[in-house]
Amino acid sequence: MSKNYQRRTKDELARRVAQDIFDGAYVNLGIGMPTTVANHIPPGIEVVLHSENGILGMGPAPATGDEDYDLINAGKQPVTLRPGGAYFHHADSFAMMRGGHLDICVLGAFQVSATGDLANWSTGEPGSIPAVGGAMDLAIGAKQTWVMMDLLTREGASKVLERCTYPLTGLACVKRIYGDLATLACTPQGLQLIDKVDGLSHAELERLLGLPVRP
């Protein structure tokens, strides 16, 4: 079958996520790919970015040579601080996460179910990280949890499943999946299409995912 579509690049995917963040939102960006969303917040709106190690008002990544390794995000990457930004104790940061004070969190994932179950901390393989960390607090505590990921594994298997096979982070917590091929809503009735890349047919998307997707 000929392929008439191109996947979103990581920058294009980050820009697509940023496009849906509303003015005045308090947003946590998870470790890995989600941190790049900070570089694509549209001009003219105020978005307050949170990092679980204790930052509010995080800015985009610093220019090469301007890094300050006393100012890092939860993934230990150097970040910038916007005017009015602050840093504070880890316990206060988790109180924000658990207390429903974040409008959106953007997380990576290994698997997401069609109804929004999230598996993003372990594949169950020996030697994997020993605990879920802050992902569980974010996934359940934020008002909306969005996942940002490639929709397929390197082997071509779908990472969106009827039921996750990896250890779960949270149940029915994911509202949207921002993928390299499509943006999907997770609902109690299953997947619903928000948008897809040009040239990808609806039938081909369903074939790749192995799941029905409501238009």
Image (cartoon, grey):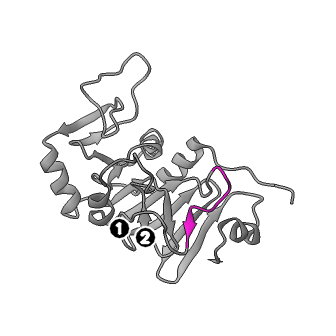
**Residue 123 percent across, percent down from the top left:** 45, 56
Q: Which residue is mark 2?
A: 117
- Residue 172 lies in the magenta-colored region: no
| Residue type at the position of mark 2 | Asp
Residue, x 15% and y 56% (percent of image)? 95
As rendered, which of 25 and 155 lies closer to the eye?
A: 155
Dot 2: element: loop
Residue, x 75% and y 72% (percent of image)? 203
Q: Quadrant of residue 80?
A: top left
* Residue contact at pointers 2 and 1, CB within 8 angstroms: yes
Q: Residue furthest front?
A: 126
Q: Residue furthest bottom?
A: 189
**Residue 141 percent across, percent down from the top left:** 26, 64
**Residue 46 percent across, percent down from the top left:** 34, 48
Q: Quadrant of residue 74?
A: top left
As rendered, which of 149 and 57 lies closer to the eye?
A: 149
Left or right: 73 in relation to 192: left
Q: Residue furthest right?
A: 2
Q: Give the CA distance from mark 2 to mark 1.
A: 6 Å
The C terminus - image quarter: bottom right
Establish if 212 lies above or below 76. below
Residue extent of the magenta highlight: 154-161
> Are there few (<14), some (14-19), or many (20+) residues within 10 Å of tag 2?
many
Residue, x 33% and y 53% (percent of image)? 27
Residue, x 28% and y 51% (percent of image)? 133
Left or right: 30 in relation to 102: right
Secondary structure mostly seen in magenta is loop
Q: Which residue is mark 1?
A: 170
The N terminus - image quarter: bottom right
Which badge, 2 or 1, is on the more N-terminal residue? 2
Say the numbered circle drawn on residue 115.
none
**Residue 201 percent across, percent down from the top left:** 76, 66
